[in-house]
């Protein structure tokens, strides 16, 4: 694991804990920090998140995370020692929602095939 991978993983772990334990915002209940990409100069971090809910709920959580970024950043600075404390940019991670959608579509196709097979055997 490279140095940057370790930095990304540590920042991800700490932000996850901060969001769950420190913010006290009920909208953050179902938020998962999926990935963090800290820039090579350590000045910026892209924080990918996922949330269970509708599109409006997801957008509300994204806005809440952006508004809380200063608080999250301050807590992060208290928890880890870095030369620079990165500015946080929160980005919705669509991959989990896409995986769920794809899984449902595949299940529907499987169900249709089984239904057709059962009717053709009759």
Image (cartoon, rainbow, N blue to C red):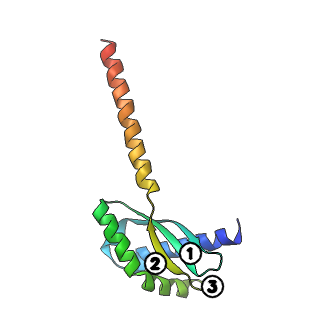
From the viewer's perspective, is residue 39 above or below residue 120?
A: below
Rendered location of residue 42, percent (x, y)? 62, 80
Report the residue marked by disc 2.
18
Q: Which residue does the image show at 50% across and 71% down from the upper left?
A: 47
Which quadrant: the N terminus? bottom right
Res 11 label: 1
* Residue identifier under label 3: 82
The residue at 31%/60% (across/down) is: 55
C-alpha span from label 1 to label 2: 10 Å
Where residue 98 appears, x then y in whole percent? 42, 51
Secondary structure of the residue carrying numbered label 1: helix
| Mark 3: secondary structure | loop
Residue 119 percent coordinates (x, y): 30, 17
Quadrant containing the C terminus is top left
Mark 1 or mark 3, which has the lower sequence index? 1
Relative to 85, is 120 above or below? above
| Number of residues whose C-alpha sits closer than 10 Å to that of mark 2, classed few (under 14), some (14–19) or many (20 or more) | some
């Amino acid at each position: 694991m490279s140095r940057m991978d370790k930095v990304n993983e540590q920042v991800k772990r700490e932000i996850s804990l901060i969001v769950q334990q420190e913010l006290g915002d009920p909208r953050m209940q179902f938020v998962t920090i999926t990935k963090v990409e800290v820039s090579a100069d350590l000045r910026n971090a892209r924080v990918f998140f996922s949330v269970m809910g509708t599109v409006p709920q997801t957008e509300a959580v994204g806005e809440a995370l952006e508004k809380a970024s200063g608080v999250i950043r301050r807590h992060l600075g208290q928890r880890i020692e870095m030369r620079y404390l990165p500015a946080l940019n929160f980005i919705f991670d669509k991959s989990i929602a896409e995986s769920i959608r794809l899984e449902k579509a595949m299940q529907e196709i499987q169900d249709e095939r089984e239904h057709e097979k059962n009717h053709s055997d009759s």
